[in-house]
Image (spheres, helix red, strand yellow):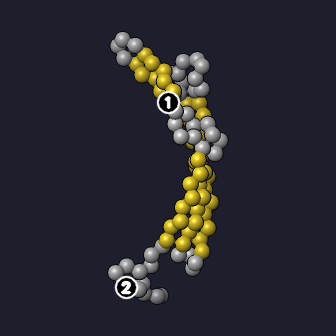
Amino acid sequence: MGNDLSYNTNSNIAPGFKKDFYFWNASLGYSFYNKQLTAKIKVYDVLNQNQSVKRTITDSYFEDREDLILKRYIMFSLSMKLNKFAGKKPKKK
């Protein structure tokens, strides 16, 4: 089981843009087949608050911009642990 949570803020954005948000990812994995295989499901942006707001300032203008980005999504994975490499078996203790 895994979690990571971060808080993002941008105080220089014009009114009308959301200035802060939480970004939370959560995952759950299960090992099987003598702990050789691990199946995992991970949910990115659990709270669905991710945003891409940025301010650009130059000598002649400033711009506040919000871009379309990937919000909440789920990823499934299956990984395999290899105990042998080049046909050699690990030594037992």
The picture places residue 6, in percent across and down from the top left corner, at 57, 42
Find disc 2 in the rendering and name its residue.
Answer: 88
Rounded to the nearest angstrom, the CA distance separating label 2 from label 1 is: 51 Å
Hey, which quadrant is residue 83 in on the image?
bottom left
> Which mark identifies residue 37?
none
Residue at 61 percent across and 67 percent down: it is: 30
Residue located farthest toward the bottom when viewing the structure as drawn: 92
Residue at 37 percent across and 79 percent down: it is: 85
The picture places residue 26, in percent across and down from the top left corner, at 61, 52
Hey, which quadrant is residue 51 in on the image?
top right
The picture places residue 3, in percent across and down from the top left corner, at 61, 52
Q: Nearer the viewer, mark 2 or mark 1?
A: 1
- 66 is higher (above) or lower (below) than 37: above
- Callout 1 crowding tier (Cα within 10 Å): few <14, some 14–19, many ≥20: few
Q: Horizontal placement of 63 versus 76: left or right? A: left
Type of the residue with mark 2: Lys
- 57 is higher (above) or lower (below) than 37: above
Describe the element under mark 2 as helix, strand or loop. loop
Find disc 1 in the rendering and name its residue.
Answer: 67
Q: Across the whole image, how many numbered discs are drawn on residues?
A: 2
Describe the element under mark 1 as helix, strand or loop. strand
Hey, which quadrant is residue 71 in on the image?
top right
Residue at 62 percent across and 60 percent down: it is: 28
The picture places residue 60, in percent across and down from the top left corner, at 36, 11
Type of the residue with mark 1: Asp
- 92 is higher (above) or lower (below) than 5: below
Is residue 10 at all visible to an observer of this figure? yes
Q: Nearer the viewer, residue 11 or 47?
A: 47
* Callout 2 touching callout 1 (CB < 8 Å): no
Residue at 46 percent across and 88 percent down: it is: 92
